[in-house]
Amino acid sequence: MFDTSGHVAELDEPIAWAGFEPGGWILDLLCVEPLASLDDDGVLDRIEALERIRSLLDAEQSVALADFARRRARVSHADRCGADVGDEVALALRIAPRTADRRVDVAVQLTERLPATLSAMGRGRATLSKARVLLEETDQLSAADAAAVESAVIEGAADMTPGQLRRRAARAAIRIDAEAAARRRKQAETGRAVWVEPDACGMATLGASLCAADAVGIYELLDRSARAARTAGDQRTLDQLRADLLVQAIGGGVVRASRPLVQIVLPADAVTDDAAPPAELVGYGPIDHDLAREIVATGAWQRLLTDPATGTITDVGRTRYRPPAALADLVRARGRACAFPTCQQPAARCDLDHRRPWSAGGATNAQNLWPLCGRHHSVKDGSAGWSCALRRDGAITWTTPVGRVYTIHRDSDDDAIVRVTTAESTQPPEHPPKRPSEDLPPPF
């Protein structure tokens, strides 16, 4: 493969890299040959090989995540407190805490319940998405029954899509224990939920996890109505019509005065000056000037005026809605999101936490309050090894049970941007951190 000078030797036949067991050495060799030298089949072979290597990396990370979770569990058992593994991982990987929770849970479940699937990932025969499918379809089964389902489907997993694998696993699970399948469905229905995730260009994804019959019924109703509108001459696409019909059915969008309160962080001159910094829709992020003006025109909003030079909240405006307490308005407007480094829970859905506890003499004022979601409020006040403090320069410092220190610096011109720097330590701090109140800035 290599000649005596270390260069790649010419081969009579191209090597099918996707047929090899995945490993770091394959990645090294793949990177030697430029894509321009490959034909279409060779490029597809490289894509396949890289996918198998990705599965190997996911398997190795899963093993490491599960090991870390068990280490922290041993420590927490000794201390009789929660390990908060997800928060620690979230900070290390710069991901949302709930995303970290899901990664850790998947890793632990794979190592404990589906070792054959984890092994298949290591050999490039199953992807992480397929592993999650098997975890979901065997979640309520006994360990023995889960192993039986895994054994029945894992060998063919490489040749199936995740959807095909899900159907095959579901059939196997029902055959093994039909009553357990009914219990799983009823248990799953307790997790029904609706959520929103910001997308690009002023768009967002509204998601819902529903009973399958309800979800299919709602979609069919929207689809039937959309097709009828198209037949009647409506020029919108079917996707556009289904989306618009959903909005109309629920409440009519931003043009309805009865909709929930919308908050906008609005530079003082943003409504009239296109050169002004963009407004920010709380819970979403920056929006263009036209959308900001459209929302403002409805009157169904609460403005949070900022100083154009610094981005600091200078006024909490009000419209037709009965406002919350002025102090809560100011604290939530100033914080915008939970004060935990990787948490983006909007401040409107957070607790107003006393930096210095009320029981320790902390005052209920703007200087001593900040937004913390319920999860990270509990981490701050009730989890051993965690501490946080507000520095005089406005930065927020969190120290984790492992001993890492994370500092958030919020840009003065855009509080939606958070820069996180990390100072690593192999041991937790020897001395307890200062009370947050000791580093508080002077009163306004």
Image (tube, rainbow, N blue to C red):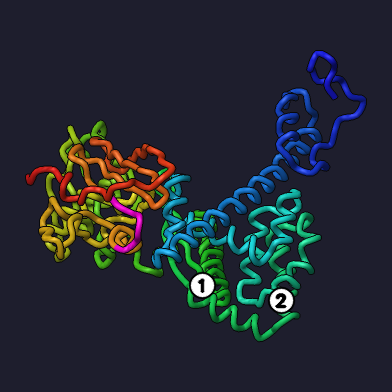
Amino acid identity at mark 1: Leu
Residue at numbered disc 2? 145
Q: Seen from this angle, which residue lies furthest right?
A: 12
Q: Is residue 1 visible?
A: yes
Residue 411 image-quadrant placement: top left
Residues under labels 2 and 1: Cα distance? 26 Å
Residue 88 position, x and y percent, is 43, 52
Any mark on residue 210, and which? 1
Residue at 85% of width from left, 17% of height from top? 3
Badge 1 crowding class, 10 Å Cα cut-off, few under 14, some 14 to 19, many 20 or more, is some
Residue 315 position, x and y percent, is 12, 48
**Magenta residues?**
382-388
Tell me: 111 left or right of 442.
Answer: right
For discs 2 and 1, the disc positioned in front in the rendered view? 2
Along the viewing direction, whichever of 53 and 16 lies nearer the viewer: 53
Asked whether 337 falls inside the magenta stretch, the response is no
Residue at 20% of width from left, 55% of height from top? 355
Tell me: 434 left or right of 14.
Answer: left
